[in-house]
Every structure is written in C-alpha cells, then in structure tokens.
Image (spheres, grey):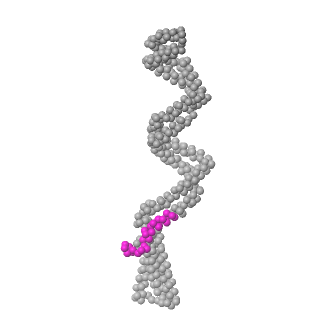
C-alpha cells in the first residue's frame, strides 16, 4: 500500500497571506500610517486577493463537502455526492466505450503474440516447473471426479455405440489366427480339457452321456426297417445304462486327460482347424459367421451390467491415478516440465504453427472482448458502488485534493492582480 500523501496547504497559506495583508493595510490606513496612491493600489490588490481566495476555497470545498454544513448547507455544494450517479455513469462510459472500447482493444490485440508470451513465461526452468505443478494439481482434481455419475453414463453410452458400430468380424478373425499361430489356443484347449476331465471323473456327465446314447439309439431305430429294425431293437435292449455309461465316462475322461497333458493331441489340432475355418469365414464375409459376431456385439452393447463395469473401471482408474500422483508427484511434474520444454522447442522452429497460434489467440480474445465487453463497465460500476459516499469523496480528495489547492492559490493571486489593475485603471481615469 502506498503511503498517504501529505496534505497540501498552499491554498490555506495563500488565503492567510491575502487576509493578513488586507487586515494589516486596512488598519494602517485607518490610523493614517500609510497614505498615497501606491498604497491604495496595494490595498485594492490584497482586498481582491481575499475575495478571489475565498471564492475559490468555496468552489473547491463545494466539490467534496456541504458548505457551510448540516442544514445550513447551500444547494450547490457537496457536488460529488449529489451527482454520484452521473459521475459513476461518466466513469463507466469513459472506461467502457472510450478507453477500453472493443475497437481499441482489438487494435491493441493486433500486435499481441501468444507464442511470444509462452516463450517468455516458460523460458526458465522455474516457469516450466510452475506450469507443471499447476497441471499436476488439476490432474489430481480431475482424477477425483472420475467416478462422477454423469461421466460414467456418458462413457457407457459412448462404449455402447462403439461396440455396436465397430467392425469386429475381421479384427476377431485376425486375432483368432494370431492366437492359433502363437500356440495360445493349445494352452486354452489343455485348460478346458483338464477342467472337463475333472468333471467327467466325478460323474458330472453320466446323465448327459446316457441321454446322448439313448437319443442316438432311438434315432437309429427310427431310420431302420425290416430285419435291420429288429437288430436296432436288440442293440437298444442290450445297452446297459450303468455299465456302458461308466465305460463311456472312463473313455471320455482318458481322452480329455490325454488332451490336457499333450499340447499336440490330435483333437486339439482339430479344434484349431475348426476355429481357423471360422476365422476364414469371417474374412470372406460369410453371413452366418458374421451374424454371430453381430449378435455378440448387440448382446454386449445392451447388457445391463455394462455401466457397472465402466463404473468399476473408473473407480480403479481413480485409485490408480491418485496413488501415482501422490507417490510419484515429483516425477510426474518433472515429466510434464520436460514435455512443455520439448513442445516449446518444436514450436520455436515452426513459424507456421506460431502464426496459427497467434492468429487463434487474437481472434479468440477479440471475440471474448466483444461478447463480454459489458463486464468492463459492470466491474467499474461495482467497484465504485462498493464505496459509500464519504469513502468515495475521501478517495477522490486524496488523489486530487492536493492539486486542487493550487486553484485557491491561483484565485488569490489572480484576484490580487485584477484588483491592482482595476484600482490602477480607476486612478488613471480619475474615478476615485
């Protein structure tokens, strides 16, 4: 805060000198201590100086306060307070429509270079580190909002649309071929075979196997006729569900166990051949194969749990981001500072990019000034309205009151000179 300026007493001193001189000369004249034309001119000068000084004292005082004061105040005093609204409107108009008009601001923006400002601001390591620290704080706040319900809903809807419209068939086909080529499917078949072997050994498939055999026999009998049909009935009657079912279970379990142990099992190769054939159908646009992929996409896109999945992913992402920002903030900020430095280095050598950046900044700032120009006047008005009447007067008097004291000095001096000239003129014309 700047120190309060010392009060200027030039006006008081000049009026005091004029009044003192006038009184002294009048007393001396009354007692005949001074006589002659010259003293008459001097007396007239001091008299006029008093009149001029008092008149200008009244004029200056009337700006800031009621004169003489209270209920006795004259009507055209306390001018600033009485005309506060006009004064405010005038200041707002001056600032908004003249000093900071849209045209004047745009004129100033013609020479504005955002790239130059960026280079000056981030030329030092401290400047880049400050920007990186600010970005790090913003990243922390952004991470904390990752679980926002609106964001979750937006991302879920976006994911549903992407799942529906994505061309997954050729990608899925290529992925299948890559997995088969890498041998990943053999591991999958071994894992599935081991799981199924465990279930078969526990007897989980016994009922299913019996139903399959019985259904096969029934179908076989239905297709036969004559003597062959009799043979079918004999085969059906000879089938022992308990004994033959157990044999089937043992055989199935052994086959699955062998497949689980041997990655090169022939049945695994057949499975690979089957999925490769499916991938080939996807590549050529086979309708049936492609329809299965589209059906899978639609089921996934409309699944009611998809939003919960997105929510869990955002929760995990928030926790991971907060942990990383907390435990590695220094590394993160250093990486950001280096990124800023590399970006500015590239920008320095790209004149076209600098020109585009500067043009964008000027157009954007000019547009903002035009759209929100009223904020300037509103801000000025609100700043003035925050001061009560006496605070406003005190502020103005502190800024210009001292300079206005010279008006009082000028009033006394000019009044005195006019008085001298008038008296001298009257004497020359013989009017006294």
User: Where's residue 215, x and y in %?
Assistant: 49, 17
- Quadrant containing the N terminus in the rendered view: bottom left
Within the image, what quadrant is residue 176 found in? top right
In front of the other: 267 or 138: 267
Residue sticking out furthest to the bottom: 430
Q: Tell me if 292 is positioned left or right of 32 in this view.
A: right
The residue at the point 43 percent across, 69 percent down is 82
Say whether residue 98 is magenta.
no
| Main SS category, magenta section | helix
When the figure is inspected, residue 266 is found, relative to residue 46, above or below; the finding is above
Q: Can residue 236 be seen in this view?
A: yes
The residue at the point 43 percent across, 75 percent down is 58
In front of the other: 296 or 200: 296
User: Where's residue 430, x and y in %?
Assistant: 50, 91
When the figure is inspected, residue 148 is found, relative to residue 303, above or below; the finding is below
User: Where's residue 203, x and y in %?
Assistant: 43, 17
In front of the other: 204 or 52: 204
When the figure is inspected, residue 198 is found, relative to residue 77, above or below; the finding is above
In front of the other: 320 or 422: 320
When the figure is inspected, residue 73 is found, relative to residue 108, above or below; the finding is below
Q: Give the range drawn in magenta.
A: 68-94
Within the image, what quadrant is residue 8 found in? bottom left
Q: Can residue 7 be seen in this view?
A: no
């Amino acid at each position: 805060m700047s120190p309060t300026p010392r009060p200027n007493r030039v006006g008081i001193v000049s009026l005091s000198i004029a009044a003192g001189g006038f009184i002294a000369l009048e007393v001396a004249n009354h007692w005949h201590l001074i006589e002659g034309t010259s003293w008459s001119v001097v007396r007239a000068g001091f008299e006029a100086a008093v009149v001029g000084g008092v008149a200008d004292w009244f004029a200056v005082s009337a700006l800031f306060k009621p004169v003489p004061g209270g209920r006795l105040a004259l009507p055209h005093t306390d001018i600033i307070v009485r005309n506060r609204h006009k004064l405010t409107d005038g200041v707002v108009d001056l600032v908004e429509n003249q000093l900071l008009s849209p045209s004047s601001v745009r004129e100033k923006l013609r020479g504005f270079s955002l790239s130059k400002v960026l280079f000056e601001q981030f030329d030092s390591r401290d400047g880049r580190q400050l920007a990186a620290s600010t970005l790090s704080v913003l990243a922390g706040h952004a991470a904390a909002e990752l679980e926002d319900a609106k964001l979750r809903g937006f991302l879920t809807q976006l994911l549903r649309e992407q799942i529906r419209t994505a061309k997954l068939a050729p990608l899925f086909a290529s992925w299948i071929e890559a997995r088969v080529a890498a041998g990943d499917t053999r591991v999958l078949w071994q894992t599935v075979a081991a799981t199924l072997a465990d279930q078969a050994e526990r007897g989980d498939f016994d009922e299913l196997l019996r139903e399959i055999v019985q259904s096969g026999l029934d179908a076989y009998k239905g297709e036969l006729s004559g003597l062959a049909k009799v043979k079918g009935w004999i085969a059906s009657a000879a089938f022992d569900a308990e004994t033959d079912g157990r044999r089937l279970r043992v055989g199935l379990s052994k086959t699955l166990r062998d497949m689980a142990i041997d990655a090169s099992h022939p049945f695994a190769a057949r499975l690979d051949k089957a999925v490769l054939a499916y991938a080939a159908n996807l590549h050529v646009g086979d309708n049936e194969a492609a329809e299965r992929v589209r059906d899978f996409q639609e089921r996934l896109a409309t699944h009611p749990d998809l939003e919960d999945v997105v929510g869990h992913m955002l929760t995990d992402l928030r926790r991971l981001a907060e942990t990383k920002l907390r435990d590695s903030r220094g590394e993160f900020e250093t990486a950001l500072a280096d990124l800023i430095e590399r970006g500015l280095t590239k920008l320095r050598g790209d004149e076209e990019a600098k020109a585009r950046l500067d043009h964008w900044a000027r157009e954007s700032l000019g547009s903002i000034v035009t759209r929100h120009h009223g904020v300037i006047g509103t801000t000025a008005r609100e700043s003035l309205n925050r001061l009560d009447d006496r605070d406003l007067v005190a502020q103005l008097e502190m800024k210009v009151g001292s300079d206005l004291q010279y008006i009082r000095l000028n009033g006394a001096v000019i009044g005195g000179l006019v008085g001298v000239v008038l008296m001298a003129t009257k004497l020359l014309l013989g009017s006294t």
